[in-house]
């Protein structure tokens, strides 16, 4: 079985046979980017063709693409067991769930499994509606079924301390020794690019899928002040949010921009020109108005900058004096933005180096550092700082230095709500998880109730003291 995606830039004459050609030419039903599951003869596989025809029209391209990989994984698993989605039984569904959640080399998170459940339920709903099957292959009792997780778990939150972050950046990414000198044996590449990307992740909370698709024009030159970036098309679930970028991070980005990026742009101009027919050629970019206009092949389009989809961001170029230059910020050797796999490989290599050369600075941490760990670090550090600020304001209010807070003020300075907004969480419960990683929680609770355990203080005195403090 094979997985491919509809690409309207390719001519239908390249189809392997008449059925595939006819399928590709069905413009009304097959949208650009739609997944196609193909058999060994490269013919579209049902019911997946019909399923994705129905889903693609009402779902974003990035989500449908993820659904495509989920469907391919599920269908391939069933094929290895000698069955398919129509003839699979409850045992097959249970085996797939166990494989994904426990037995795989890298078990998936509960959130990823829930996305896969959407695909599985969706295709079986289609099969029942079309009469291919009478009922789902699993039995549901109450809220329990073969698709339901057998346990409840939370995301693996692994924030870094400041010392761990410094070790990862200096030793792992920049190629220094644990004592701070440059390591002559280090053979890493693009240290400034990797440093800038990591600093964006840890100081803004951006996901790797977000900062890897940033355009150069979206981060201004350093001026002593920070900046903000409006994310939407590249954000998870396309949930719009504005991200603040500190001035120090802008300086790190500009150092990369003036050195490594400039060199890559010069070297790649000729190769980009040779492949220009497959690129999104931007002939108008108004950063102030946030509008970009260009063409891909013979098709012209106009976009608001924050709505420019990742697929176009990765191939967007414009003509400069020295030739074509990619609009993306973090470029690879070919002159176009590096992909997610390259970023994860960079973090993997940096993690191994840090664990090997700076174990003391890591404080016993053996887990590799991922881009999402830096996002978690941003969340915990920001939540702690905002909590301390809220407590300080409350102390001033009790001391009479400032007046009573209004409802809008309570909302605006609420640490959890602020972090939820900065991270783009749809569910407040996700942000609540970070609360347990604030270091001073235990000490705070102990300080509050310390006097209650004082043998010299009676219960009545403790209550009266507590009321006076309130």
Image (tube, rainbow, N blue to C red):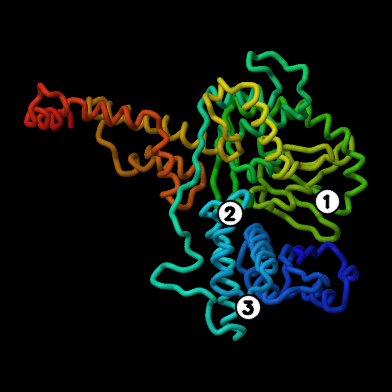
Quadrant of the image occupied by residue 361: top right
Q: State the residue position of label 3.
A: 87
In the depicted view, which residue is nearer to us: 60 or 222? 60
Q: Position of residue 204 (x, y in %)?
A: 56, 36
Instruction: Compare residues 319 and 81 and report the one nearer the observer.
Output: 81
- Marked residue nearer the N-terminal end (2 or 3): 3
**Closer to the eye: label 1 or 2:** 2
Is 281 drawn above or below residue 347 in the view shown?
A: below
In this rendering, which labeled residue sits more in front, label 1 or label 3? 3
- Residue at image mark 2: 103
State the image coordinates of residue 329 (x, y, percent, origin top left): 72, 38
Give the quarter of the figure containing the C terminus.
top left
As measured in the structure, the alpha-carbon distance from the residue carrying label 1 to the one carrying label 2 is 41 Å
Q: Tell me the crowding category of disc 1: few under 14, some 14 to 19, or many 20 or more residues within 10 angstroms, Cα based.
A: many
- For residue 150, which numbered disc appears in the image? none
Provide residue 348's location: percent of width, then percent of height: 67, 36
Disc ID at residue 279: 1
Q: Residue at x 87, y 33 (%)?
A: 266
């Amino acid at each position: 079985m094979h997985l491919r995606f509809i690409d309207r830039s390719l001519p239908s004459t390249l189809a392997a046979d008449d059925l595939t050609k006819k399928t590709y030419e069905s413009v009304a039903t097959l949208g650009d980017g739609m997944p196609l599951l193909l058999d060994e003869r490269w013919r579209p596989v049902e019911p997946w063709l019909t399923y994705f025809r129905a889903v693609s029209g009402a779902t974003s391209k990035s989500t449908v693409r993820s659904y495509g990989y989920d469907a391919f994984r599920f269908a391939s698993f069933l094929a290895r067991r000698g069955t398919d989605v129509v003839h699979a039984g409850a045992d097959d569904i249970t085996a797939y769930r166990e494989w994904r959640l426990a037995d795989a080399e890298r078990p998936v998170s509960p959130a990823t499994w829930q996305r896969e459940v959407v695909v599985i339920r969706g295709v079986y709903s289609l099969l029942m509606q079309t009469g291919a099957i009478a009922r789902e292959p699993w039995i549901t009792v109450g809220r329990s079924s073969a698709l339901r997780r057998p346990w409840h778990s939370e995301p693996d939150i692994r924030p870094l301390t400041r010392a761990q972050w410094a070790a990862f950046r200096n030793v792992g990414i920049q190629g220094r020794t644990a004592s701070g000198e440059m390591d002559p044996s280090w053979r890493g590449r693009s240290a400034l690019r990797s440093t800038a990307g990591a600093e964006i992740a840890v100081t803004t909370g951006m996901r790797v899928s977000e900062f890897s698709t940033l355009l150069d024009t979206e981060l201004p030159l350093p001026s002593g002040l920070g900046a903000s970036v409006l994310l939407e098309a590249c954000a998870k679930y396309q949930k719009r949010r504005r991200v603040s970028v500190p001035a120090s991070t802008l300086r790190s980005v500009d150092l990369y921009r003036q050195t490594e990026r400039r060199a890559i742009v010069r070297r790649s101009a000729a190769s980009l020109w040779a492949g220009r027919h497959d690129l999104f050629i931007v002939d108008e970019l108004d950063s102030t108005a946030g509008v970009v206009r260009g063409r891909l092949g013979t098709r012209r389009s106009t976009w608001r900058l924050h709505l420019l989809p990742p697929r176009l961001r990765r191939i967007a170029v414009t003509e400069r004096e020295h030739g074509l230059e990619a609009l993306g910020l973090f470029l690879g050797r070919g002159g176009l933005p590096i992909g997610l796999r390259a970023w994860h490989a960079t973090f993997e290599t940096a993690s191994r180096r840090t664990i090997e050369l700076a174990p003391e600075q890591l404080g016993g941490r053996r887990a590799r550092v991922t881009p999402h760990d830096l996002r978690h670090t941003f969340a915990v550090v920001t939540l702690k700082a905002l909590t301390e600020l809220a407590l300080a304001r409350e102390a001033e209010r009790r001391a009479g230095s400032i007046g009573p807070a209004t409802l809008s003020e309570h909302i605006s300075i609420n640490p959890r709500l602020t972090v939820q907004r900065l991270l783009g969480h749809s569910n407040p419960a996700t942000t609540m998880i970070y609360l347990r990683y604030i270091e001073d929680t235990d000490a705070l609770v102990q300080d509050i109730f310390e006097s209650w355990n004082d043998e010299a203080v009676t219960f009545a005195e403790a209550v009266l003291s507590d009321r006076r403090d309130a």
